C-alpha cells in the first residue's frame, strides 16, 4: 500500500517537474527578450516568474527523488 503511494508521488512529481521546467524555460526566453528590448516592467515580471517557476520545479524534483528513494527501502 505504502509503495503504491510513493509510486504515485514519484510519477506525479515527475510530471510536475516537467511542467514547471517548461514554464521556467518559456519565461526565461521572454526575460531575455525583455532585457534586450530594455523593458524594465516586463523584465521584472519575467524575473519573478522564472524564480518562482524554478523553485516549484526544484521542489517537485526533490519530492520525486525522495519518493524514488523510499521505493528502494525494505519494509520490515
Image: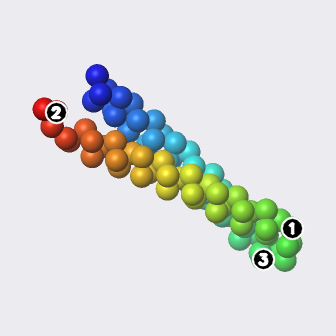
| Label of residue 53 in the image | none
> Label 1 to label 2, Cα distance in Å?
53 Å
Q: Are marks 3 and 1 in contact (CB under 8 Å)?
A: no
Residue 57 position within the rendered picture, expressed as x and y whole percent measured from the top left: 53, 53
Outermost top residue: 1
> Which element carries disc 1, helix, strand or loop?
helix
Residue 36 position within the rendered picture, expressed as x and y whole percent measured from the top left: 78, 76
Q: Which residue is mark 2?
A: 75
Q: Which residue is mark 3?
A: 36
Instruction: Classify residue 1 by image quadrant.
Output: top left
> Which element carries disc 3, helix, strand or loop?
helix
Tell whether 73 sits left or right of 16.
left
Q: Which residue is mark 1?
A: 41
Instruction: Compare residues 17 and 56 and report the one nearer the observer.
Output: 56
Tell whether 55 sits left or right of 33.
left
Instruction: Compare residues 73 and 25 and report the one nearer the observer.
Output: 73
Mark toward the start of the polypeptide (3 vs 2): 3
Amino acid at each position: 500500500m505504502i509503495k503504491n503511494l510513493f509510486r504515485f508521488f514519484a510519477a506525479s512529481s515527475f510530471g510536475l517537474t516537467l511542467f514547471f521546467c517548461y514554464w521556467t524555460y518559456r519565461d526565461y526566453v521572454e526575460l531575455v527578450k525583455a532585457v534586450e528590448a530594455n523593458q524594465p516592467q516586463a523584465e521584472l515580471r519575467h524575473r519573478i516568474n522564472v524564480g518562482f517557476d524554478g523553485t516549484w520545479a526544484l521542489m517537485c524534483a526533490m519530492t520525486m527523488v525522495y519518493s524514488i528513494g523510499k521505493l528502494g527501502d525494505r519494509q520490515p
